[in-house]
Amino acid sequence: MPTFKARALIAKGDGPHSSRRTRDDVERIFVKVNEIWLQAGIRFDCVVLDWRPDPATLEEIVTAASERRGDADALKSVTGDDPTEVTALYVRSIGGSSGKVFRPKRAVLVVDETKVSDSRTTAHEIGHLFGLEHWLAHPPPEPPDRPPGHLMARTQPGVELTPLDIQRVEASLPSCGLTPTG
Ligand SMILES: [Zn+2]
């Protein structure tokens, strides 16, 4: 089973983007994320830390996520240029969405008030790091997205990976940029 290193950073301080989550909360999230990703034989060895970034850096990251941009220059100071491990950022809000992925930085971001469970949101965004996309095999509007039950359905609570998802994840492993530790 491939194991990947992950770092979960919880925004702290007095700023508007600080998360209310505790390290215990996020450790619990990653226990469930590992249960979900066990379906693909993947686990994350996650270190959970309080994070006190420079306010301008955090502002830029949150703004990029709010505007649904897929990368943010400011993330470089957090992840480095070409990270080989997952970074999961926990912030208060990005104005409506539950989470966002920043693929070039192998980073995901999750808000305090997620519309589906916080572990599902985290696991879903990580799915994008392994090349999984929302299901659009049938052109909209029929069906607009995957039916409930699937991890990569948008705004649905499901946590299942289909056999095709698992094949795609396995195929992405050599090129996803993440280096397994075991
Ligand atoms: Zn998504």
Image (cartoon, grey):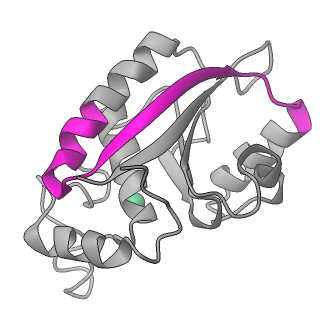
**Magenta residues, start to end:** 32-56
Residue 110 visible in image = no
Q: Which residue is drawn at 46% across and 27% down?
A: 113
Q: Residue at x 79, y 54 (%)?
A: 76
* Residue 65 counted in the magenta span: no
Q: Is residue 30 visible?
A: yes
Point out residue 83 in the picture as x, y percentages from the top left corner. Answer: 65, 57
49 is within the stretch colored magenta:
yes
Q: Where is residue 96 in the image (x, y as percent from the top left)?
A: 53, 43
**Residue 18 to residue 164: above or below:** above
The answer to whether residue 31 is above or below residue 124 is above
**Ligand 1 image position (quadrant):** bottom left
Closer to the camera in the image, 139 or 46: 46
Q: What is the tally of numbered marks visible in this picture?
A: 0
Please state the horizontal and vertical placement of residue 153, each as a whole percent of the image.
25, 60
Q: Residue at x 30, y 54 (%)?
A: 2
Q: Residue furthest front?
A: 182
Place of residue 68 in the rendered image (x, y in percent of width and height, measured from the top left): 61, 61
Residue 103: quadrant of the picture: bottom right
- Quick check: 76 above or below 119? below
Taking the image as shown, residue 71 lies to the left or right of residue 146, namely right
Q: In this view, does 151 lie to the left or right of 29?
A: left
Horizontal side, residue 167 vs residue 83: left or right:
left
Residue located at (69% from left, 64% from top):
82
Depth check: give the residue in front, 165 or 13: 165
**In terms of image quadrants, where is residue 45?**
top left
